[in-house]
Image (cartoon, grey):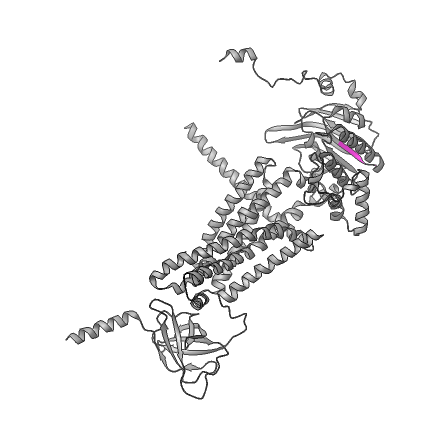
Amino acid sequence: MAAMLSFFQQIGSKAFLSLARLGRAHIFLLRTFGALPSLWGEFRLVIAQLFSVGVATVQIIAISGLTVGMVLGLQGYTTLVDFGAEDSLGQMVALSLLRELGPVLTAILFAGRAGSALTAEIGLMKVTEQLPAMEIMAVDPFKRVIAPRFIAGFISMPLLAAMFSALGIIGGYIVGVGLVGVDDGAFWSQMQAKVDFYDDIMNGVIKSVVFGVVATWIAVYEGYEATPTTEGVAKATTRTVVHTAFAVLGLDFILTALMFGGL
Amino acid sequence: MTEIETSQELLVRMEGLKFSHGNRVILDGINIDIPKGKVTTIMGPSGTGKTTVLRLITGQLTPSAGCVMVEGQEVAGLNRSALYALRKKMGMMFQSGALFSDLSVFENVAFPIREHTDLPESMIRDLVLIKLEAVGLRGAKSLLPAELSGGMARRVALARAVALDPMMVMYDEPFTGQDPITVGVIMKLIRTLNDSLGLTSILVSHDVAEVSQISDYLYVMSGGKVVEKGSPEVLQNSDSPWVQQFLNGLPDGPARFHYPAIDLADEMLSE
Amino acid sequence: MNQKAKMEIAVGAFIVFGILALLMLALKVSNLTILSGDDGYELKAGFDNIGGLKARSPVMMAGVRVGQVSNVVLDLESFEAVVTLRIFSKYNNLPKDTSASIFTSGLLGEQYIGLEAGGEEQVLADGDVLAMTQSAVVLEQIIGQFLFSKAAGDD
């Protein structure tokens, strides 16, 4: 009985801790939003972050996008050719990438490359007392450190997702048209006939904007809240990648249900 | 105990200050007065809440009870903008230096000036060079913090702390882990900057010999309380055995060498 | 300074490539016509049965894409499907007696409208109605007809 009681107590206190964490994360987000207007005129801060968040992620996005597209081209062809519908390969590759794979895989790769780096950087600024030093110099770290990184992630994600999808389609084209012999014209015309700018492309962009906010939010929050020790920063970095993956996959389901129906 | 002369103007007053973290009591009702224009040191063994005192003065932490008054304002009662206005008049040198690792030495010192003033670039340059000259590191202005030794990093941090000519500078363990020459340099800098710029300096340290030489007043803390205060001479002649143990670095005394445990013989026989 | 310039160039290139990727998706992949400024003109055609024709299905003439279906509605008086075709403005000299049929590309492919030019001098203008139409061939109907005629022939 006592064991059971303490079991429920533990669940209860865990729940309270998670609630408190969720609350802190949202207060954090509000403070970040509050600091955004002060970035006006401080573009060099944002440019520096676009470099370390966006430019640094291009390589992995480009390689992954191209290879995912090539695999889609090959696998799609082997399935479609059985129905004599291999002309629809372009449509299949484009829709898979634009609606799902582009935004989702970009967000997960972003968490692994840029998100973890953001968490580690901010966490280490905490370990080396750079954040408290800033506060004592009466400089709000939210304006100086958090907001520029947040904006950079927000801007980078849709651009990276667009690159991923565009290169994926090119990868599918290289394999489909170049290697296995789908008709060049059919590949593009089928794609163009079935891909809608608003339904498919804009919804994909909206998804990647949402993922951009969430992935960057998790990354900077985990860094800011990290226990200022070597171990604390290591744990926070892992949490960033894991939490972003869960959040992105969960949100993707909800957004897909809202955008493309089915629920 | 001798009282610090009440005629002196006080910059910081702490009264009945308590602070606890969770269930752990860190400060248990302390009274500390920091007179203007002097070097005051808070001493004590590690983990007695010395750094917590500094964080309460800067408003990074809020006391559980009691109050901290800086220039007659209660720090805990200030809103964010008033607190930031007060912090512009404070400088702090962290134990690690806390230099911004992505900025050069020059830009680190220029940082508070750029953030809080609209001075033209040429004037910022002059101000930074003067501050760097004062700590003897004008020649290192284009280095990155990673290229500095620990002592140099602290001197840059000191230049940054006084960049805006604050009214007070706080030093968190300025001597820890430094070679004797660096310790000597930092000691000299603390004293001369205090006197030449008309600063008020607050040190937190456990390096007895060094702080005794440069401090006007000393507070000794133990277990979250102030156990002794006064000028260095007063402390040397303190009749408290604990203070004597601390000042002379005796391994055993009122502060036990052993972590509390049952008798060794009992423990060995109990198996 | 040099380092800073390099960084700015890299960020600029990043933004440009990102926007180019978005433009490629918009123009090459979805064939967004709004941006190209080609509104074209609209024709209407009534069909008894349009099969699987939908908005955005292609409109072809002699195998060349000349426009797309912009809208499909059911006319409640005649119970015909009224299809609105948006024809690219460069194909502005289609004869008045052009006929429209619904075809399927391949056995399982998508359905499209095929236009066949007539011989009249007058040309179609915005809002005109195509008089001659041929409905979609529905696979089940053909099989049904085939079985029926087979049964009748055996008699």
Which quarter of the figure has residue A182? bottom left
Q: Is residue B200 magenta?
A: yes
Q: Which quadrant, please, contains the C terminus of chain C? A: bottom left
- Residue B104 location in percent, x, y? 72, 44
Of residues C79 and A96, the one nearer the viewer is A96
Residue that extends furthest to the left in the rendered view of this protein = C155
Question: Overall secondary structure of the magenta stretch?
Answer: strand
Residue A222 belongs to magenta span:
no
Determine whether, in the image, residue B260 is placed left or right of residue A13: right
Against C31, residue B163 (above or below) is above
Q: How many numbered dots are placed on residues in this image? A: 0
Q: Residue furthest front?
A: A179
The front one of A100 and B85 is A100
Residue C13 screen position, x and y as percent: 61, 58
Considering every residue shown, the one lying at the far bottom of the view is C121
Image location (x, y in percent) of residue B149: 72, 36
Left or right: where does residue C102 sit relative to residue B241? left
Depth check, front residue: C92 or A259: C92
Position of residue A1 in the picture relative to residue A65 (left or right)? left
- Identify the residue shown where x is 63% and y is 58%: C12
Q: Position of residue B193 (x, y in %)?
A: 82, 35
Q: Quadrant of residue A82?
A: bottom left
Side of A166 relative to C98 (left or right): right
| Res. C75 in view | no
| The residue stretch that appears in magenta | B198-202
